[in-house]
Image (spheres, grey):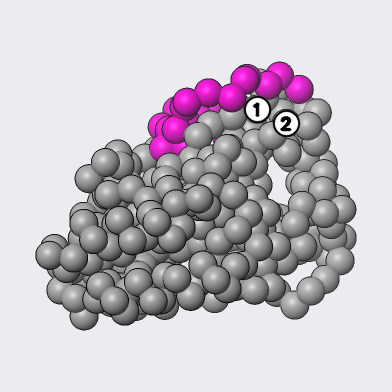
Amino acid sequence: MTANPASCSSQRQFRERLRARLARNTHQIVFALDGIPGHLVETLWNTPVIERWRAVFPTTSTTGWLSSLTGLSVKAHGIPGVVFRASNQPDSLINLCQYQGEALDIPTENIFHDARRSGYLSQAVIGDLLPIEGAWTRALLDGAAILDRTAFFTAPPQSVQARLDALDAAIERALQRAATPTVVWVFIDVDQYIHTHGYDAHVLAFLRGVETRAVALAQRGIDAIAHSDHGLVPVIHDAQIAHHIARLCHTFDATMGGAGLTRWFYVPAPHLTAFQRALTACLGEVADVIPAAELDDVPARAGDLFLIARGERFIAPPHYRYEHGARQPDELDVFYAVWEAPC
């Protein structure tokens, strides 16, 4: 394995990297591994060239995958996370994982359009995205000519081998459909499993299986690529933190949005300074309280004030053991790996 050290290179460069590979005029199979940090694959995989990149912030799937596939900053594509206001109206709060509307105007120029312009068949394996199918997934996958609905980690619980068998079948179907070179983006939502189980033996065995398949593809003259959107860190739900947030939102007429370990608040202007002071007094020991204006690359749809977790104690679904969304090192640690077929 040749590994480049961790750098400040952004995951946004994925689109440019894939576009440059299209000149090879050969199949490109892309494993999109949700929730897998760079340091993990760097220690686990022996065969690819790996680069460690930095995730965009907030470290959520909706934000990270859109930046990766479009090459756009978070401010440019306008999707800050999961729960946010679709407009500047107080009643416009949406959950992006459920939203079906057209008001967001999400950019759709992406890797699939790049591939089609270069004469490739654009395909995506999207079964693990089906539970949140809506406006975001439509934009993310725009330009993919064929959508395969195979699921891996959102299907009923199954063995590692069963998941890998499903992966094999999806890839072979995609290759059989391709009369020309093809780009196949295979979304694998390992994140769903990691939330409750962590990076256990099941995850490690699956990732080793991905490497085995990537090596076999390269030996067949097919390029294999893997990339990720964010990592996860341990979390402990703290009911007292949840109580403080609810109380302060009620007192100052604030509304909370965000996702995971980063939350933001829409606060009436006359209350903003007092709300920030109160939030810092209550939660400043466990999280950073930062005005949106002091953060880089934050779209206008995000709130006025951010609450960003610094450690394990925060708010989360009580059964979660791992979470993401903030800017702890393991959350920001993403990767780009290539198994290139011999010329």
Callout 2 touching callout 1 (CB < 8 Å): yes
Residue 57 or residue 12, whichever sits in front: 57
Q: Position of residue 145 (x, y in %)?
A: 44, 59
Q: Position of residue 338 (x, y in %)?
A: 64, 31
Local packing at callout 1 (Cα closer than 10 Å; few below 14, some 14-19, many 20+) is many
Mark 2 and mark 1 lie on one chain; the one further toward the N terminus is 2
Amino acid, disc 2:
Glu
Q: Position of residue 85 (x, y in %)?
A: 26, 69
Determine the residue positioned at 36% across, 67% down: 257
Q: Which mark is residue 50?
A: 1
In 3D space, how far apart are the residues under numbered discs 2 and 1 (Cα atoms)?
7 Å
Q: Which range of residues does the magenta coloring cover?
A: 1-28
Q: Is residue 192 above or below residue 224?
A: below
Identify residue for label 2. 42
Residue 113 or residue 25, whichever sits in front: 113
Q: Is residue 231 above or below residue 84?
A: above
Q: Position of residue 335 (x, y in %)?
A: 59, 35
Q: Is residue 139 magenta?
A: no
Q: Secondary structure at mark 2?
A: helix
Q: Is residue 3 magenta?
A: yes
